[in-house]
Image (tube, grey):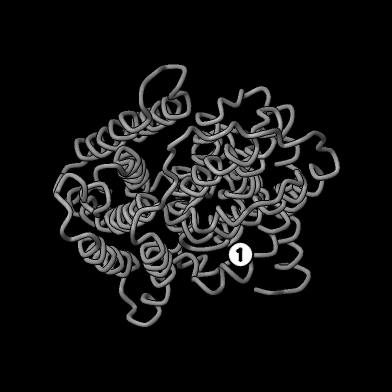
Amino acid sequence: MEAVVIIVFVVGYIAIALEHPIKVNKTASALLTGVLCWTLHAVSVENPDTVVGELSHHLSQVAEILFFLLGAMTIVELVDAYQGFRLITDRIQTKNPKILLWLICWVTFFLSSILDNLTTSIVMVSLIRKLVPNKDMRMFFAGMIVIAANAGGAWTPIGDVTTTMLWIGKQISTANIMEVLFIPSVICMAIPLIWLSFRMKGELGEAPAQAEGHNDEKPKGSRTMLALGVGALVFVPVFKSITHLPPYIGMLLGLGVIWVVSEMINPHADEAARKPYTASGALQRIDSSSVLFFLGILLAVGALESMHILTAFASWLDSTMGDNRIIITAIGLLSAVIDNVPLVAASMGMYSLDLYPTDHMIWEYLAYCAGTGGSILIIGSAAGVAVMGMEKIDFIWYLKRISLLAMLGYFAGAGAYLFIEHVLGVN
């Protein structure tokens, strides 16, 4: 039965990777894969009650990640509804293409570390549409936004879903992951940025005149919601360190506070006018299919872990490749083709916390590689896919002009981490 479960998992994995060619949403493939893996596991044992117990154990871990993501996505959506991010982006006024590129990349890098790489990419691409009317040049900006967003999300526990998974699973701690991955993440972004700065030519272009009567006024409460939203996200690691409660509790606390405040802004407006600016309205706009995608993937990986398939696979990799650094580097490159969420979930099941405790090199390096490797191809990360859709960037165009830069940054950052970890003996 193990062979059948592996086949189901691999087929599901392929269906997720080929979402666009086969025209089947990856969430549907993930849910089917997760349910089928557990069903096959249950019918293969003499006592199905043991499988139910294992499923409940895994579901509690999965629920922590899902509630965390649900809260974070709602907070970010609510801040965006109030146009809170414009308070940051509207301050960028330069007309020099190279200076603007550096500003955009650094804002993206740090914004992604607080929000997440997907949301940050959407915000920054919306910004460059106003600042860079020249379509050809704007695509280079968009490519660097993908690299900067993924690099920025890798070094904090709330910046990328894979790093969040490792943080919630207790594989990494907040202060340590920020300390050891900040420099590699900066290098991962800086190498492509420096190269492109010397190679990029042309002008930003002229923006079309705004139509008469255009209303560019921000909604009431935008400053308040930005401060509360960012504060709530940044407070989560602090809350965890003080109370030792799971991170999703801190995230739900932040959501509750910002929800109450959103209800108090414009209390006398009619219900229809207020709804887009309330948390209940934000909940309707979040990408709930992504939450179900994570559920399906994590359930499938949990089934493989319960059947000890991942442990056996880890032993095979260890005996074949030998060095865990090579294995993790390969996982990062593979994340450019295959979604990094199932890759990291599988890796968490492959390696035991008893053998590799919290903040071990293998978890730190995995957070970096899985978070930044997806930049090598535009389909390798959620940020890349979002930018691809918004700017209609062709896969081949990105492959020819951005992929090599992203790969150079990836290996430069990886080398920096390994140097810090091995030569300087940080761990």
Q: Secondary structure at mark 1?
A: helix
Residue nearer the viewer, 239 or 64: 239
Residue nearer the viewer, 245 or 138: 138
Q: Is there any visible trace of residue 169 in the rendered image? A: no
Residue 23: x, y in percent?
A: 39, 18
Location of residue 416 by image quarter: bottom right
Q: Is residue 377 left or right of residue 257?
A: right
Residue that appears at 41% across and 70% down: 231
Residue that appears at 63% across and 41% down: 131
Question: Could you tell me the amino acid type at mark 1?
Answer: Met
Q: Which residue reaches farthest front?
A: 212
Q: Is there any visible trace of residue 68 in the rendered image? A: yes
> How dense is the environment of label 1, judged by Cα within 10 Å: few (below 14), some, or many (20 and up)?
many
Where 248 sits versus 98, above or below? below
Quadrant into which the N terminus falls: top left
Where 75 sits versus 276, above or below? below
Residue 116: x, y in percent?
A: 47, 53
Q: Which residue reaches farthest top?
A: 22
Residue 299: x, y in percent?
A: 31, 44
Question: What residue would you read off at disc 1?
Answer: 361
Q: Is residue 339 left or right of residue 130?
A: left
Residue that appears at 65% across and 73% down: 427
Location of residue 164 by image quarter: bottom left
Q: Which residue reaches farthest bottom?
A: 242
Residue 112: x, y in percent?
A: 53, 55
Total of numbered circles in the picture? 1
Q: Is residue 242 left or right of residue 256?
A: right
Q: Is residue 74 left or right of residue 117?
A: left
Residue that appears at 17% across and 44% down: 272
